[in-house]
């Protein structure tokens, strides 16, 4: 894309955003709350939702991004992965988000990740986009960069600052690399658009690169990307601006944001509300609220035993800070919980992850008043990452159309997961040897 074209696209996007803000201001002054360029009101799970960019979602249920680890080791989709997303589309979700699609092979979080850049075979991604976008489902790509959490056997991890901690070592990403980063997000988003995907989500949660920059615990820089929260959010805002300029005003851009890292001295809810306020002034179409981090030793929110949505109270506070549509991911286990969150007006979309691993057709079953609560397996004394491994291997079964109601043994799932990672690591290293 030429410099002139980029500048023109960015100008157009900013003009559209200003029109949208003006519309929202007028509506609020007349006593009606607006979300983006749309009317916001308390809704139901099966009402459509229009995003600020104009895209209409058929209901309020989304398949949240998960690292399915079903890539072939060369960064490309497999038949099982395509079938997995086809299954979710057939099950009735409005949005399905492919987790951890990497900008580059250098900072993947798993050797089963997809990599979408100029070296990719776009036709193989088009096949995934076509089948995962059936039945009116909007298939989005999550734009990922693991940073300090990059998978060490295939990477040389780099984060905002150099770290030498138990289980975590990384170099500091350079200022020149930081200045190239927005263009990398933009290029992968543009390629996703060309391949037929219906939107993108910029990943700024769970301890990956943009989340690392937001955290004062891991970002100790003294340049324009460190210090105050206004500086720490700069990489995220730069990625948004470059991505919007690349894809134009009508293509959805979402952001996944932590409510907090749940680590002492890390990114907290006060910082998160400041970021939400900044995102409200940006051109994005949706904020997906989550929390927690995958830094070694940290407790994963998704492995918790609570029965309610994990971050609902923060979402209520975020609602007061933005008119953007809000999605909430984490802890939804029943239809009643999802209905209440949307009906209350706290959020616009409910993000489901593990519930859809247990039952890929859950949205349609809920709509038909069937199966209000999936049965979640319980694992005693699970090692760190063990439950994630079990769910990941369950995704493999769904993609092969061979899942059963029987809860498989946790130890076997962990062994299968580790064996597959080792195999794909070798494929990855051979394929990307010259990158």
Image (tube, rainbow, N blue to C red):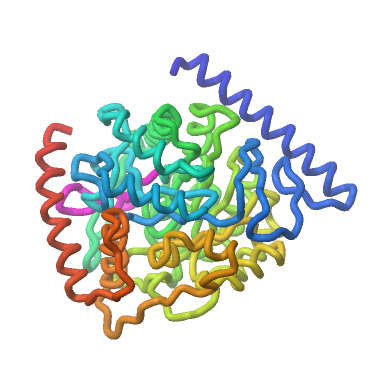
Look at 50% across and 44% down and name the residue there.
135
In the rendered image, which quarter is residue 218 located in? bottom left
In this image, 68 relative to 3: left or right?
left
| 100 over 381 or under it: above or below | above
Look at 84% across and 42% down and name the residue there.
26
Q: State the quadrant of the N terminus.
A: top left
**Where does residue 69 sit, x and y in percent of width and height?**
27, 53
**Where does residue 389 sit, x and y in percent of width and height?**
26, 66
The stretch drawn in magenta includes residue 157: yes
Highlighted magenta segment, given as a residue range: 143-162
| 164 over 116 or under it: above or below | below
**Is residue 360 in view?**
yes
In this image, 300 relative to 106: left or right?
right
Q: Nearer the viewer, residue 312 or 168?
A: 312
Residue at the far bottom in the pictured view: 380
Q: Nearer the viewer, residue 213 or 259?
A: 259
Q: Nearer the viewer, residue 410 or 288?
A: 410
The stretch drawn in magenta includes residue 179: no
**Is residue 238 in view?**
no
Q: State the quadrant of the C terminus.
A: top left
In the rendered image, which quarter is residue 163 located in? bottom left
Look at 64% across and 56% down and name the residue there.
46
| 306 over 430 or under it: above or below | below
């Amino acid at each position: 894309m030429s410099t002139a074209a980029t500048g023109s696209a960015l100008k157009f996007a900013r003009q559209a955003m200003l029109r949208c803000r003006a519309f929202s201001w007028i509506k609020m002054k007349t006593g009606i709350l607006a979300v983006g360029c749309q009317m916001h009101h308390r809704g139901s799970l099966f009402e459509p939702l229009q995003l600020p960019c104009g895209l209409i979602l058929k209901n309020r249920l989304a398949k949240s991004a998960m690292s399915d680890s079903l890539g072939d080791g060369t960064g490309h989709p497999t038949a099982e992965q395509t079938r997995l997303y086809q299954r979710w589309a057939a099950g009735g979700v409005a949005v399905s988000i492919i987790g951890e699609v990497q900008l580059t092979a250098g900072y993947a979080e798993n050797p089963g990740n997809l990599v979408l850049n100029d070296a990719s075979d776009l036709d193989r991604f088009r096949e995934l986009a076509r089948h995962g976008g059936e039945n009116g489902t909007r298939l989005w790509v999550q734009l990922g960069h693991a940073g300090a959490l990059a998978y060490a056997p295939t990477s040389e991890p780099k984060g905002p600052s150099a770290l030498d901690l138990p289980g975590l070592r990384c170099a500091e990403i350079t200022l020149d690399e930081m200045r190239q980063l927005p263009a990398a997000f933009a290029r992968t988003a543009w390629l996703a658009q060309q391949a037929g995907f219906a939107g993108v989500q910029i990943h700024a949660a769970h301890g990956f690169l943009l989340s690392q920059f937001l955290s004062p615990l891991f970002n100790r820089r003294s340049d324009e990307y460190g210090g105050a929260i206004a500086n720490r959010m700069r990489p995220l805002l730069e990625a948004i601006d470059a991505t919007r300029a690349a894809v134009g005003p009508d293509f959805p851009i979402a952001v996944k944001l932590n409510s907090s890292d749940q680590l002492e001295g890390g990114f907290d809810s006060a910082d998160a509300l400041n970021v939400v306020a900044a995102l409200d002034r940006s051109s994005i179409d949706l904020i997906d609220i989550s929390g927690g981090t995958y830094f070694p030793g940290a407790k994963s929110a998704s492995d918790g035993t609570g029965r309610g949505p994990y971050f609902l109270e923060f979402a209520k506070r975020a609602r007061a800070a933005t008119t953007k549509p809000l999605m909430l991911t984490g802890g939804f286990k029943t239809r009643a919980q999802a209905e209440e969150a949307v009906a209350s007006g706290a959020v616009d979309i409910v993000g489901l992850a593990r519930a859809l691993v247990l039952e890929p057709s859950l949205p349609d079953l809920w709509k038909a008043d069937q199966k209000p609560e999936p049965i979640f397996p319980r694992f005693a004394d699970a090692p760190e990452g063990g439950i994630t491994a079990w769910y990941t291997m369950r995704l493999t079964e769904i993609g092969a159309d061979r899942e059963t109601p029987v809860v498989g043994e946790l130890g076997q799932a962990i062994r299968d997961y580790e064996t597959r990672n080792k195999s794909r690591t070798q494929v990855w290293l051979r394929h990307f040897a010259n990158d």
